[in-house]
Structure formats: structure tokens, C-alpha cells
Image: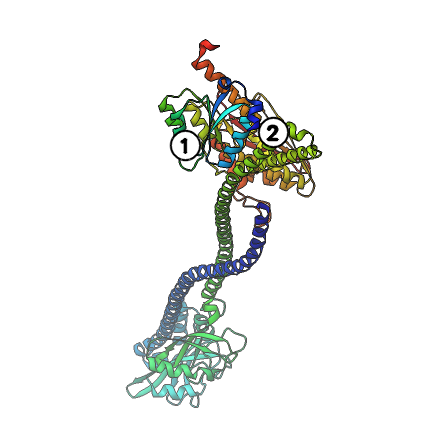
């Protein structure tokens, strides 16, 4: 009966397992996918926000700082240059105001004055000259032979004559080198003349040329025609036409500094700081490539990107890793639960089979007893003399013996059924351990024969009675023997069961169950008594047998251990205490 | 019955048995076999029958099945005790219900046998019980 049921069971279980395995794999995959996704979203959102906000703030303040710096730079240089020009003009004007034409119209006097100015300002002043209304240079002091030079047709003279003071653009003029002129027109009682000075271009140029910004930033000055008033510090001079924009822009902003970003003709975006000079006649332009100006910002962006990528990588890795671990745990827990459920069902089934078996065994006992006794009664009657002559007497006797033998066999079967199927109760009694072991060995002998396993016993006859639950110790023994039988299913072998009074543990009985099966790998030994640890295929073992044994023996105040070597066999030892 | 003729000894020396079991077939065949072996057997098919029987006559040994429909063997045993009977009681139990048998022994039953039992074992036990009864109640006879 038992065998049939278990066969059906394992069959059904197998197909169930296949289905649930397929379904559960899908379930766990989607579970881990969802977990990974939510972990990534939850971690990414704040990271993106923080990095984004910080970067934006940094960018804004960095822009502001760069613009302010440029603004200040242009402002300062604008002032410097304006001051430089005005100062030179003031020097000349001072001469014109304080000295008469007569005094001035003297080369020696001019020479002296030039010397003074040079003493004060270095070689900024190249020369000094007095030009009369006709454009003739009446007096001159300087390195060149320019006495009596006629400036009547010179552009600067024409313009200067219209105004009180004048600062010219840079031009080559008579001397053929870039220079510019500072001139003051003086009206001395109807006699008009111009006192002019040539300003050294290099000295003026240095005011602007020294202005450097980052790697690509430099400054230059343009006049209204878009011509350079300084030597631009770059290989290819930019097309002055492209700066027309600044003229119109600066006019609108009046005296303020214009900061703007433009793409120049080579396609590079530049940052420009523009201010007007010389009452709007010149433009001071500071130009820097945007990439250079904002190189720190770019570095910051790269850094942020690297941090983001690393962070993202970390998050994705951790989300995957932890999720995988978590899902694996959940899966194991589910499997354990599943195993537990199966065990509960199994236990329930066993219990009902047990009750059924017990009922049947009881019911069969009486008819069998009657049959055996009736046979006995016939035997009694055959003893009578009247039957002694019968030819078939021997045959009758043989038949009766057979009935008796078979009746006894029935009795044994019902006895075994009853011992096995009795409800596991933990009520303790005084029991002789050897009897219980023999009972279990009897019960297992059929199965052992089937597996080509021989069960040998070596039981010490003088064991004391011990107070334990017989059904519990039965369960332990049955488990150990069944495990050994399972292990030797293919190979066959021998199980040795022995009992004796322990020499190691005082007042303990030791039971040794030893097989010469394939043994247990060393790695599995520490987990052997763990619940749900099994090496049997799914559906075949619940992994509870040994853990239940462990629990039972522990409860009895005893202990159980295992020794095993692969290829040699396994030995379980159980110590159970007794009272003297 | 001819068997009785053949095996009958002096009426006085025969051991008086009371056989109590609700399994009639078992009681009948057992009584036949025991009578053939020179026991004087009275059959009772229930606890009630048994109590009626002991009221009417004395017995040396009672064989009492512990599992009966009308009345538990232990209950019968208790009533016998109350009646202060001199007879010895051998209990029959099913396999695996020795617990009840032990309780019976505590209540003064002589011993128990597991059912179904071998006839020779039962007879041996009956003789032991009888010997004990003689020893306890008629020490002077020995």
C-alpha cells in the first residue's frame, strides 16, 4: 500500500515541479527586474537633480564671475588709456596755455621742454612742434629733421585746426612709422597756432599689449574705420569689418562696458569685452575664446560627468548585485516554505494512513485469531481415535499446520503495521532500546533485501531500560536506516547497527548506525542536520529527516554526530542518557 | 461431548475459567479447546454477561478481553475488584495497546497476553494464575 502511494506521489510531484519551476523562474525574473528598476530610478533621480542643480548654479555664478572680471579689466584699461591720452594732451595744453607763441617758437626752448617731458614720462614723447595757420612747422624739437615741414595737406592738421584739442589715430605720416599726434590749438590775440607732440607708438601699444587673459585672451584698439590702433597679438589679424557690430552696440550702451559672445570668421566662439576710448573715437576690445574663458567650467562639467558615470555605474551594479542576492534569498525562503508545506501534507497523509492501517490491523486480528483457533480445534479433534485410521490424517495435519503458519504470518503483518502506523506520540515509557531497534530492522528488512543491502546488528544484551518515547526513537532509527538504504540504492552494501553502554559518555547508551555506502562529501557535513538540507532530487526528499532526528535526540538530552568519508561510508552515532 | 468424556477428570480438580470476549467465534472455539484440555469453561460474550456470571458462581481464573463493545475491559476489571473476587484475571490485548494492559496490572490483574495468542502460552499462563490463586487464598492446601 505504501509503495503504491509513494509511486503516485512522486509522479504527480514531478509534473507539478516542472510547471511551478517554469512559472516561478518567470516570477523571480520579473521580480528582480522590477526591484532593479525601482532601485535605479530612486537613486538616479536625486543624483541627477543634485548634479544638475549644482552644475547649473556653478555655471551661473562662474559666468557672472567671468563677465565681472572681464568688465573690470576692460574698465580699468579703458581708464588707464584714457588717462594716458588725456595726460599727454594736458601736458601739451599746459605748454600752450602758459607760454606765448614767441617763447614757444624757438627750437631750443622746445628742446628743453621735450627734455623735461621725457624726464617725467620717459620716451613717450618723441618730438614737439609748433605749426602755424599755414600748416608750416615753425619750430621743432626731436630726433627727426622736420623743421619747416608742411602739414597743410595732412589729415590730422585739417581736423586739429577745427578743434581746440586733438588726438589723432595711428598713422604712418611723413616718417613712415606708426605714431599718433596729440595737438592743441591756441588762439593768441588773433594769432592761431598748433602745438603738437608725437607719442611713441610702442609706449602706447604696451598699455594694451600687456593685457593678457588666460591662454587666448588679448586686447586691441580699433578706430572708427575699423583699423588697429595697436599691434594685435595674434597671427592672423581679424577682419575689422566684423567689429562694426561693436560700434553700434557700444553707442547704445554709452559709456558702459559691453560684454558679448560672438563667433568670429574662423568659427570659434569668443567672449568680447568692449569699451569706448577717446570720447567714443576708439574701441578697446578684449577678446578671449569662450572655451578658454570657461575652461574651469568645462573641467567642472567633465568632472561632474565622470562622477555621474561612476555613480551611475555603482548604482546599477549595486542594484543588480543586491537585488540578485535578495531574490535568491526570497527564492530559497519560498522553496523552504514549499518544502515545509509538502512536509505538513506528507505528515497529515502519513497520519491518516497510519490510523487506517491501525484500524484494519485491529479488525483483521480477531478473524485471524478465530481461524487459527478453529484450525487448532480441528487439530485437537483429529487426535480422537476415530480419525486415527483415516488415510488422509497426515494430509489434514499438514493442512492445519499450514493454516497455523499462515495465520501466524498474518499476525506478524498486523503487528508490524500497528507498530509502524501507531500515531507518533511523545509519551515516554521505560523501554528496552534493543527491542525497538529489532522492530525497526524487521520493518526495514524487506526494503533492504530489495536494495541488496544486508542489515547486521550487534546489540549489547545488558542494556538498561531507558525512559524515552518509543515512537520518537523509532522515527530516528527509521530515518537513519532509510537514508542509508537510499544511499546504497544502486550499489547495495551492509548496514551495521550496534548498541552498547558508552565508554566515552558516562551513563549513556550509544547507538551506532554504520553503512559502507558512497559517503557524504566533506562540504555537506556541517549542514547535514540543517532543516531543508537535502542532496536528493527535488520532490524526493524534504531535507527534514535528519533535522527531526537531531531535534528528537536533543530533546532526549542526548546527542547525535556523523562521521563520513567519500567512498568509504557513513557512521551516525547517537548517545542517549539513562538513569542507573 | 465425547471429548469431555475422554478428558474429564474429577470435577473438583478442574480449573474453573471464565472466558470474556465479545467476539463470539473466538470465545466458542477457545472454550472448546480449553474444555478438551480439561478446563471448566464458562463463556461470557460481553462485560455485562461476565458480571452476571461471577455473581452466580465462583471462578479460579478469568480471561478478559480489554476491547469490547459494551464495556471496556478495564471497567469490568474495576467492577470485579469492587466485588472482592478471589479469581485471577488474565487480560487479552490487541497489539500496541499494552498501555491498557499495564493499567490493568496496576488494578490487580494477574498478567496479560497479546491477542491472538498461542494456546499453549495461554494454558501456561492459566496454570500460573491458578497456582497463584491457590497460594493466595488457600495457603493451608499447599
> Where residue A1 is drawn, which disc sits there?
none
The residue lying at 59 percent from left, 53 percent from top is A11
Q: How many marks?
A: 2
In percent of width and height, residue B76 lies at 40, 29
Q: CA distance from mark 1 to mark 2?
A: 28 Å
Please state the chain letter of the residue tagged with numbered disc 1 in the rendered image: B
**Res. B34 visible in picture:** yes
Q: Residue at x 30, y 78 (%)?
A: A97
Quadrant for residue A118, please give it: bottom left
Location of residue A159 (image quadrant): bottom left
Which type of secondary structure does the marked residue at label 2 adopt? Answer: helix
* Foreground of the two, A429 or B134: B134
Q: Position of residue B116 (x, y in %)?
A: 54, 32
User: Is A413 rendered above or below residue B51?
Assistant: below
Residue that badge 1 annotates:
B49
- Locate residue A412: give its quadrant: top right
Output the chain of dot 2: A
Image location (x, y in percent) of residue A72: 37, 69
Q: Which residue is mark 2?
A: A380
Residue A217 visible to the viewer: no
Amino acid at each position: 500500500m505504501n509503495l503504491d502511494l509513494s509511486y503516485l506521489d512522486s509522479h504527480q510531484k514531478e509534473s507539478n515541479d516542472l510547471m511551478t519551476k517554469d512559472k516561478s523562474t518567470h516570477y523571480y525574473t520579473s521580480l528582480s527586474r522590477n526591484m532593479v528598476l525601482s532601485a535605479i530610478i530612486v537613486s538616479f533621480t536625486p543624483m541627477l537633480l543634485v548634479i544638475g542643480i549644482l552644475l547649473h548654479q556653478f555655471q551661473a555664478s562662474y559666468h557672472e564671475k567671468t563677465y565681472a572680471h572681464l568688465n573690470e579689466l576692460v574698465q580699468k584699461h579703458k581708464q588707464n588709456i584714457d588717462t594716458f591720452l588725456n595726460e599727454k594732451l594736458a601736458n601739451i595744453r599746459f605748454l600752450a596755455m602758459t607760454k606765448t607763441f614767441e617763447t614757444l617758437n624757438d627750437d631750443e626752448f622746445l628742446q628743453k621742454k621735450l627734455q623735461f617731458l621725457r624726464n617725467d614720462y620717459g620716451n613717450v614723447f618723441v618730438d614737439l612742434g609748433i605749426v602755424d595757420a599755414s600748416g608750416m612747422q615753425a619750430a621743432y624739437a626731436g630726433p627727426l629733421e622736420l623743421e619747416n615741414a608742411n602739414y597743410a595737406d595732412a589729415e590730422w592738421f585739417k581736423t586739429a585746426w577745427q578743434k581746440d584739442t586733438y588726438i589723432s589715430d595711428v598713422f604712418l605720416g611723413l616718417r613712415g612709422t606708426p605714431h599718433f599726434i596729440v595737438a592743441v590749438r591756441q588762439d593768441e590775440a588773433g594769432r592761431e597756432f598748433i602745438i603738437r607732440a608725437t607719442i611713441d607708438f610702442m609706449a602706447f601699444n604696451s598699455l594694451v599689449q600687456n593685457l593678457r587673459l588666460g591662454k587666448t585672451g588679448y586686447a586691441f584698439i580699433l578706430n572708427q574705420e575699423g583699423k588697429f590702433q595697436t599691434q594685435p597679438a595674434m597671427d592672423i589679424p581679424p577682419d575689422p569689418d566684423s567689429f562694426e557690430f561693436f560700434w553700434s552696440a557700444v553707442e547704445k550702451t554709452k559709456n558702459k562696458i559691453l560684454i558679448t559672445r560672438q563667433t568670429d570668421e574662423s568659427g570659434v566662439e569668443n567672449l568680447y569685452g568692449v569699451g569706448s576710448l577717446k570720447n567714443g573715437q576708439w574701441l578697446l576690445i578684449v577678446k578671449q575664446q569662450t572655451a578658454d574663458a570657461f575652461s574651469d567650467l568645462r573641467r567642472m562639467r567633465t568632472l561632474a560627468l565622470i562622477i555621474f558615470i561612476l555613480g551611475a555605474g555603482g548604482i546599477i551594479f549595486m542594484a543588480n548585485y543586491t537585488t540578485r542576492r535578495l531574490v535568491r534569498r526570497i527564492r530559497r525562503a519560498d522553496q523552504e516554505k514549499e518544502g515545509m508545506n509538502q512536509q505538513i501534507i506528507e505528515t497529515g497523509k502519513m497520519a491518516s494512513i497510519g490510523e487506517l492501517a491501525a484500524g484494519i490491523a485491529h479488525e483483521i486480528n480477531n478473524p485471524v485469531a478465530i481461524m487459527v483457533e478453529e484450525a487448532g480445534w480441528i487439530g485437537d479433534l483429529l487426535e480422537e481415535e476415530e480419525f486415527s485410521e483415516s488415510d488422509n490424517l497426515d494430509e489434514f495435519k499438514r493442512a492445519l499446520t499450514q493454516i497455523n503458519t499462515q495465520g501466524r504470518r498474518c499476525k506478524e503483518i498486523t503487528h508490524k503495521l500497528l507498530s509502524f502506523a501507531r500515531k507518533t506520540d511523545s509519551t515516554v515509557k521505560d523501554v528496552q532500546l534493543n527491542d525497538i531497534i529489532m522492530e525497526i530492522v524487521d520493518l526495514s528488512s524487506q526494503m533492504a533485501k530489495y536494495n541488496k543491502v544486508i542489515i547486521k546488528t550487534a546489540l549489547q544484551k545488558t542494556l538498561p531500560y531507558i525512559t524515552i518515547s518509543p515512537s520518537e526513537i523509532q522515527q530516528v532509527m527509521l530515518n537513519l536506516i532509510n537514508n542509508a538504504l537510499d544511499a546504497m540504492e544502486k550499489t547495495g552494501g551492509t548496514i551495521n547497527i550496534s548498541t552498547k553502554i558508552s565508554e566515552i559518555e558516562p551513563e549513556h547508551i550509544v547507538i551506532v548506525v554504520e553503512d559502507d555506502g558512497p559517503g557524504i562529501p566533506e562540504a555537506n557535513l556541517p549542514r547535514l542536520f540543517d532543516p531543508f538540507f537535502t542532496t536528493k532530487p527535488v520532490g524526493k526528499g524534504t531535507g527534514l529527516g535528519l533535522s527531526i532526528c537531531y531535534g528528537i535526540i536533543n530533546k532526549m538530552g542526548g546527542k547525535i554526530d556523523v562521521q563520513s568519508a567519500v567512498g568509504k561510508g557513513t557512521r551516525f552515532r547517537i548517545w542517549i542518557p539513562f538513569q542507573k | 461431548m465425547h471429548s469431555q468424556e475422554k478428558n474429564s477428570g474429577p470435577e473438583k480438580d478442574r480449573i474453573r475459567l471464565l472466558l470474556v470476549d465479545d467476539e463470539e467465534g473466538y470465545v466458542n472455539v477457545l472454550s472448546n479447546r480449553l474444555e478438551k484440555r480439561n478446563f471448566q469453561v464458562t463463556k461470557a460474550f460481553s462485560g455485562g454477561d461476565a458480571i452476571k456470571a461471577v455473581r452466580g458462581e465462583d471462578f479460579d481464573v478469568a480471561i478478559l478481553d480489554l476491547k469490547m463493545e459494551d464495556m471496556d475491559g478495564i471497567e469490568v476489571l474495576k467492577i470485579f475488584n469492587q466485588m472482592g473476587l478471589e479469581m485471577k484475571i488474565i487480560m487479552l490485548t490487541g497489539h500496541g495497546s499494552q498501555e491498557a494492559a499495564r493499567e490493568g496490572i496496576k488494578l490487580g490483574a494477574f498478567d496479560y497476553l497479546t491477542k491472538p495468542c498461542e494456546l499453549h502460552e495461554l494454558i501456561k499462563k492459566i496454570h500460573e494464575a491458578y497456582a497463584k490463586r491457590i497460594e493466595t487464598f488457600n495457603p493451608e492446601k499447599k
